[in-house]
Amino acid sequence: MSRRLQSPHSAWARVFKRALDLLLAVPTCLALAPLFALTAIAIKLDSPGPVLFAQKRWGRNREHFTMLKFRSLRHGAGDPHERYEMLEHDSRITRVGAFIRRTSIDELPQLFNVVAGSMSLVGPRPLVDWESLEADKTHGERYRVKPGITGWSQVTVRNAADFHGRLDKDVEYVQRCSPAFDLWILLLTPWTVLRSKGIYPEAVEHRRG
């Protein structure tokens, strides 16, 4: 997709956002190095396959980038069918994978995406390809900013809302985005993670028409 959109941030706000990303992400990566190592060892001992999961996602202005996660699924296990949302008792999730998904440890490698500049600490979550195509039909405004590790949808509804409900929150973030709003979302994020609620959609298979 070659169509480009203007960022809703002013120039100074974009500079502040990038500076905040680096100021927080770089020392956090260093501080969490032992946790990264322990997680990598646990994943390797639990199931065969790579430690990291890398997948192309849509970023700002719909440009593709490679998003990183700790692998939480059995290596080589494909989607059971098209347009499938991950469920809590999905047979593809490993034992370690269930824990790191519940605690959001699986998302931590995205700190390297933040340092590289393809993601921000705060922004709409990067979606898988079919979700991105669906989102672009009705909520294209969400691609005016970089995707984030956490976001307004994650600290409010998470996966307890349906797909379009989460997209509504993404667009609300874009419309309200500011350094102060980013800081507020970052402050709310640890509480959201500790609550461990809304990680998965309801225990039904969701198909999008």
Image (cartoon, rainbow, N blue to C red):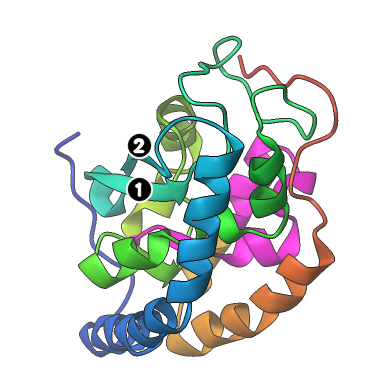
Q: Is residue 147 magenta?
A: yes
Q: Is residue 18 magenta?
A: no
Residue under pointer 2 = 55
Q: Is residue 141 visible?
A: no
* Labels 2 and 1 touching (C-beta < 8 A): yes
- Residue 37: give x, y in percent of width and height: 46, 64
- Residue 63: give x, y in percent of width and height: 22, 45
Magenta region's main secondary structure?
helix
Closer to the chain start, of discs 2 and 1, is 2
- Residue 165: give x, y in percent of width and height: 69, 45
Q: Residue at x 56, y 65 (%)?
A: 151
* Mark 2–mark 1 distance (CA, rounded to whole Å): 5 Å
Quadrant where the image shows the C terminus: top right
Q: Secondary structure at mark 1?
A: strand
Q: Nearer the viewer, residue 92 or 179?
A: 92
| Residue type for callout 2 | Gln
For the magenta stretch, what is the residue range? 145-171
Furthest residue toward left? 2
